[in-house]
Amino acid sequence: MGNRGMEDLIPLINKLQDAFSTIGQSCNLDLPQIAVVGGQSAGKSSVLENFVGRDFLPRGSGIVTRRPLILQLVNNKAEYAEFLHCKNKKFVDFEEVRSEIEAETERITGSNKGISPIPINLRVYSPNVLNLTLIDLPGMTKVAVGDQPVDIEHQIRDMLMQFITKESCLILAVTPANTDLANSDALKIAKEVDPQGLRTIGVITKLDLMDEGTDAKDILENKLLPLRRGYIGVVNRSQKDIDGKKDIGAAMAAERKFFLSHPSYRHIAERMGTPHLQKALNQQLTNHIRDTLPGLAQQAAEQYLGLEKEVAEYKNFSPDDPQRKTKALLQLVQQFGVDFEKCIEGSGDQVDTNELSGGAKINRIFHERFPFELVKIVFDEKELRREISHAIKNVHGVRTGLFTPDLAFEAIVKKQIVKLKTPCLKCIDLVIQELINTVRQCTNKLNSYPRLREETERIVTTFVREREGKTKDQVGSDLMSGYWKKRFLLSVYPHWLLPAPQVIRKGWLTLNISIMKGGSKEYWFVLTAESLSWYKDEEEKEKKYMLPLDNLKLRDVEKGFMSAKHVFAIFNTESRNVYKDLRQIELACDSQEDVDSWKASFLRAGVYPEKDQVDNEDSAPADTFSMDPQLERQVETIRNLVDSYIGIINKSIRDLMPKTIMHIMINSAKDFIHSELLAYLYSAGNQSSLMEESADQAQRRDEMLRMYQALKEALNIIGDISTTTISTPVPPPHNSVSEPTSSYESLGRDARVLGATPGPPLNPSPAFGVPLNPSPAFGAPPIPSRPGPPMNAFGSGPDPFSAPPQIPSRPARVPPGVPR
């Protein structure tokens, strides 16, 4: 090869596999490898044993390979084996290797024929092998046997897919020749992930067991179901040979004899057999590693840089250092306070798009849920009038009053205000629950320290519960004193000192009017807490009408047969005209969602949906109504005053409740976390016990550090391959004018030397600009150096996966046979 860089490529990947297997994960790096797939009893194990020249794999019926076996073959003078999980132990007896594989398999999977994706790493050193790395995967099966799970077929398939779906993985599809190739499990699953056959190498076993008069010539010549990398046939030992302890060397000689003597295979015998398969896999894996090495280095570098910031926190890390614990406690409490405030006040970073939480949910409670609870309070009209009548009579006593008594109004109002306390307390409870949820959400970052998280949640939750009692007491006090405050404000302050009405919503709506009165038309509507106005356009310069919201309610309107819009109506509860001479106006939206949204906005403005009133036809008690006209006028006066006053109180409470809760509860909680939480934590117990790490955090830190070291080692290993590679210049092309051979004869001779297989061409390119010659160990003569693309062992054309061929250093010579 001209340098030792290419020879180091396969050992390089072996080192990477060992580095990542040590930490129990692959760091998401797609290492170049060859995965051996096939059905049960397809001969996969025999092929691997022929490579090594030893019996070392478990055998038997059913699923024998139940964990992936990463088999690393290393050319070495001494012969022994090593397991990654048995460090510093050399296995010279390969029967012990088999026993160790069986024991390690059962240690993870048990003895019930179950499977596991955790690999076993085995490295075999031998003078009889070429550098090669393969992954022996469980054989595909259809039916569960014994204690196997019923979905064993899908489990095996999923495991195979974990390996062969990666573009960096070559697929060695092993298929027995005595079955129909079209039904091959190995080729079927390989075609799913590699439909063009670019990564698949076909191996045909059991050629000696085919029915008499049949052969696999078309398959091996790549004419039937062609693959870009072709097929190679092998003959393994039979079960009788294995039971009789037939030597693998003798079996290899018998395999060679079979191909040379068989009339259908003798012309391709040089391209068949286990030695050629091993040589071809060595060459193809080497080329594949060379092509994927730059991308592999980039992946490792990206992950290394991604971990560097986190690992920097753990450099010189001492879990029991008091100074570190103190610093970590201060930082975590400070971060908890920042996170809690962001959840309440809102933040642009890490916005949750799945659901409302924190301050957004509390805002929804204030402005949607709480007003809805107030609206749900329904006053029984007949019962209210009866109570007013009784109050007036009781105030007057034996005398007949000429004027409406204030005391009757005050008694009725106090009784109605008490009914508002229930929704107020429910609003506080909802806010309390959301605050506690927010505290738990913010303490997720303290999971590394379970005791600290537990104490933080307990202290903050206790404080919130204490503020709950104070808030409820304050709300009850405000409700009872609000009556006198409102009477005072209404009697002292003029109307022009009241705040400007709040704009609740703006948008386009269609005002439905009969054609005689102008027809339907779109206007720009503005809804405030006091009125509904509509304008010609969104500039709001030309106002068409302003409708006060007093005594207005909403009503559903059925959608017209020919209309595509959804309609709702506004009407006056006192049967007055709403707009011009219309008792109700109909407003139309494009969708039902818009209608519901507008209804919710009207609800916030105090315009509620119409409630069906079912008249009770049962006769009322005799003392419910009075025939005294003067008493009836007084009842009606107080009824109107109560209705107006309760409306004022409702608006006041909707404004007062959020402010009270924010001041007494939420703002106090934020101040407590920022200023007092740390002191409470110090007084809660021993600081060392608070800052004890969880087992999960310690494991995560150790795994991160191991992964960081593995990636660092991987980058060093990959860097070594470029620093130790010594490139040599491309040798000049030979001047073969003196050779009398024609160009076609020359190509034919080269094809015979290389063992070209008919079918789609494949030509592994030279590495680092140097043609890759076959190993002299297999007796093949060196390829003559000629101009043009180099030939390969699987075809005579250029390889689409190889690097571009080197440009000759001087003009190409004239082909032989052509006169100058």
Image: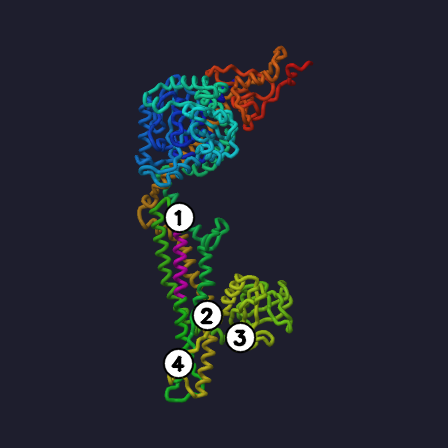
- Cβ atoms at labels 1 and 3 below 8 Å apart: no
Of tags 1 and 3, the one toward the viewer is 3
- Where in the figure is residue 690, as x and y percent of width and height? 33, 46
The residue that label 3 is drawn on is 572
Q: Rounded to the nearest whole Å, what is the CA distance between mark 1 and mark 3? A: 53 Å
Q: Residues within 10 Å of mark 4 (few under 14, many from 20)?
A: few
Q: Secondary structure at mark 4?
A: loop
Report which quarter residue 385 is drawn in: bottom left
Q: Which mark is residue 719?
A: none
Magenta span covers which residues? 424-440
Left or right: where does residue 478 sit relative to residue 789?
left
Q: Furthest residue to the front?
A: 213
Assess whether residue 244 is covered by the magenta stretch: no
Q: Secondary structure at mark 1?
A: helix
Of tags 1 and 4, the one toward the viewer is 4
Look at label 2 and name its amino acid: Asn
Q: Which mark is residue 618?
A: 4
The residue that label 2 is drawn on is 650
Q: Main secondary structure of the magenta part?
A: helix
Assess whether residue 429 is covered by the magenta stretch: yes
Look at label 4 and name its amino acid: Asp
- Where in the figure is residue 174, as x and y percent of width and height? 43, 29
